[in-house]
Image (cartoon, grey):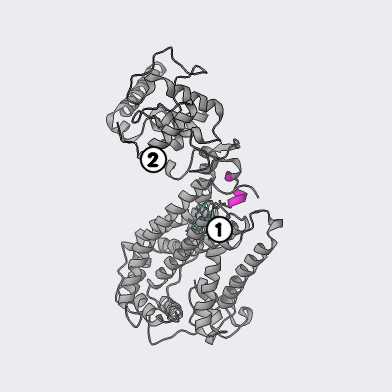
Amino acid sequence: MADDKKPAGQALQEQLGQLTDQVQGSQAWSSIFRPGSIFRKGYNDSPRNRSYVIMNSVLYHLHPVKVKRHAVKVSYTLCLGGLSFFLFILLTVTGIFLMFFYRPTAAQAWDDIQTLQTAVGFGLLVRNMHRWTAHLMVLTVFLHMARVFYHGAYKPPREFNWVIGVMLLQFTLLLSFTGYLLPWDQLALWAVTVGTNMMGFTPVFGEQVRFVLLGGVEIGTDTLLRWYTLHVLMLPFVVVIFMAIHFWRVRKDGGISGPL
Amino acid sequence: MTEIPEHLRKRAEAAKAKAQGTTDAPAGDASPAGGAPAGDEKIPSHLLDRGIAAADQPGTVAGGPAPPAGSSGPDGHNQRLLTVVKSGSIQDTKATPQDKVHVWPHLLLAEFLAALAITLFSLLFSIFVNAPLLELADFNKTPNPSKAPWYFLGLQELLTMFHPMVAGVTIPGIGLFVLVMAPYIDKNPSKRPEDRKFAISLMTVHLMFWSVLVMIGSFFRGPGFNFIFPWNSGLFFEL
Ligand code: HEM
């Protein structure tokens, strides 16, 4: 018995090995993974392979191969910029889920949310996550700004990245605010009423600003459609572009700012 | 051979002539490689020599055959100096080597752990705390108090004190403008906290100003947006 088993196990191992070689030698595999990718040649820990992990993957768009030793200290950035970005990704994922069940009309919106919470698997959980991470993101972006300021990280050559950052802060607030209306409950309606009344005080064309924002003189189903489009399409699109510029500048300005 | 712009060609010729001490450089044959950088004082002389030596060789004129094996420059090099890109012009590079670490695993691992932690946190929080969903929107039933989302409550708070133009436009407008312009207003090159007492104080006051207003608006305003103490009158706050 024992004699029988061992060859069988070995045979299996050999077959697996052959299969791996076949897959990794196939054109499909080598078309997916670039020469030098760790998925072609395997990974064992060496400085060269550590570089390849970044250099031969899409991560190279986000990170250089090496950074200043000081830059990886969590106590410096407190991860706040990275967390803002990650929360944005979480919000995108949960938001897409919500879009499957939501119609932006005054007649349907509230019912859809109600149904989502009571009759859709994980509906309540995903809605909760979308809402709480949205609030959290406003907070992390705000704190990120504070940490950048206290480090003096907006000083040359990073002045312009600070300007981009302030834009991102405003877009984050707008994203949150446009989302606020969508459940179409009393909270949504009146919070947005208060908010847009404030915008109506813009000098000279206050009335026009309010009209454009609301898609009419009063909040209504047109406002809902308008804010929905802003919330799920336009603002995320703009934010992604600004984030791309933001991250690119972090890198071009010589990585994150040095020790104090 | 591609056309060399007139002014570059002239400059190259002049430089080459200067370097060789002659004036017989034939037009059209000028190699920008050998001569162009000659006018620049900052280029190390050994590089210059190499470039000039290379340009002198007949074989290295653009389009010509590769130089014979024996004809190498002063240090045994047979490359030509094409151009010198000064560091600092395109990217913020450091002249002295810096202490660097690999992004993988040092940075990616930290990022991964942070992402995991915040995912877990929001998952757990969302399991235990439900997002609010009040009754269907009703235009005829104004809730009392009506509050904006929390991050706008500072503005709403200002509205109780000032004319709407001032509270809703002038103050936040100036605040935002100063914030955007901060790097251009603050000319102090130092990043050390002890050198930036004024900037730090100003920002702290600014942040505190909004934080305190938001807190008051969130927790200390009840029906009619009147001042209350939450421990007496309860919370009038929804997220
Ligand atoms: C959606 C919002 C934002 C995202 C996702 C984001 C992301 C990031 C990330 C990942 C970094 C790298 C260093 C770090 O993690 O701290 C960074 C750096 C930076 N951010 Fe942001 N950021 C956002 C908003 C802002 C805001 C509101 C400001 C300022 C008003 C700002 C200004 C800066 C500056 C100046 C740096 C360079 C910091 C340094 O070199 O130390 N960013 N940002």
The chain ID associated with circle 2 is: B
Q: Position of residue A33 (x, y in %)?
A: 35, 34
Q: Is residue B230 above or below residue B30?
A: below
Type of amino acid under label 2: His
Instruction: Please count the marks in the image.
Output: 2
**Residue B7 - label:** 2
Q: Residue at x 44, y 78 (%)?
A: A199
Query: Callout 1: residue from which chain?
Result: A
Q: What residue type is labelled 1?
A: His
Whether label 1 lies within 8 Å of ligand 1 gets the answer: yes
Name the residue furthest left: A27
- Distance from the alpha carbon under mark 2 to that under mark 1: 50 Å
Viewer-closest of B42 and A172: B42
Q: Is residue B218 above or below residue A157?
A: below
- Magenta span main SS: helix
For discs 2 and 1, the disc positioned in front in the rendered view: 2
Q: Which mark is residue A73?
A: none
**Element under disc 1:** helix
